[in-house]
Amino acid sequence: MCIFCKIANHEIPSKIVYEDDKYLAFLDLSQTTYGHTLVIPKKHSKNIFELDDSSFDIMRVVKKVALILKEKLNPIGINIISNNERPLQSVEHFHIHIIPRYEDDNFDIGFKDNSKIYNLDDILEEIK
């Protein structure tokens, strides 16, 4: 059983922000920024590719928790991120990070402009 399944089953203590019959939201131990919270389905799925179609209502919970964090912690914005597969998924149980943002919080996702390298028409053709 993975660590998030143990948290969902209350076998490991966590700082729960929200819980219902299908989902659990709890504070991330790393606290990338103040209030960094994870939302997980209680039913195990390794990543989004294995997620049961009935679990896609998780975004309803993500919105609910994001609104709670916005109201209570007063961030200037919020990032919502899900890493799937390597190299970035550290726990193989689907989860969504809700990361409140603050002035000078030293968190950077690192998007960069590669529009001079990649041709959108080529990408679209490959996808189709």
Image (tube, grey):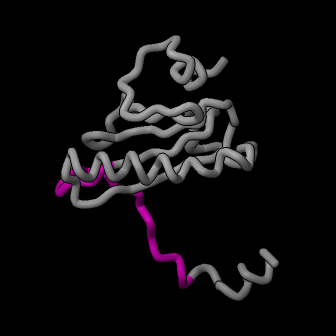
Quadrant holding the N terminus: top right
Using residue 92 as the reference point, say whether residue 124 is left or right of it.
right
Q: Main secondary structure of the magenta part?
A: loop
Q: Is residue 4 left or right of residue 30?
A: right
Residue 45: image location, x then y, percent = 69, 36
Q: Tell me which residue sits at (49%, 39%) in the image.
A: 39
- Tell me if residue 114 is in the magenta stretch: yes
Q: Nearer the viewer, residue 109 or 50?
A: 50
Percent across and percent down for residue 41 are 59, 36
Instruction: Give yes or no for residue 103 being in the magenta stretch.
Output: yes
Residue 14, how many percent across, how many down?
40, 21
Closer-to-camera residue (72/115): 72
The residue at the point 17 percent across, 57 percent down is 103
State which region is magenta. 100-116
In screen coordinates, is 26 left or right of 33?
right
Residue at 60%, 30% in the rendered image: 42
Position of 102 compared to 32: left or right? left
The foreground one among 92 and 74 is 74
Q: Quadrant of residue 51?
A: top right
Q: Is residue 14 above or below residue 18?
A: above
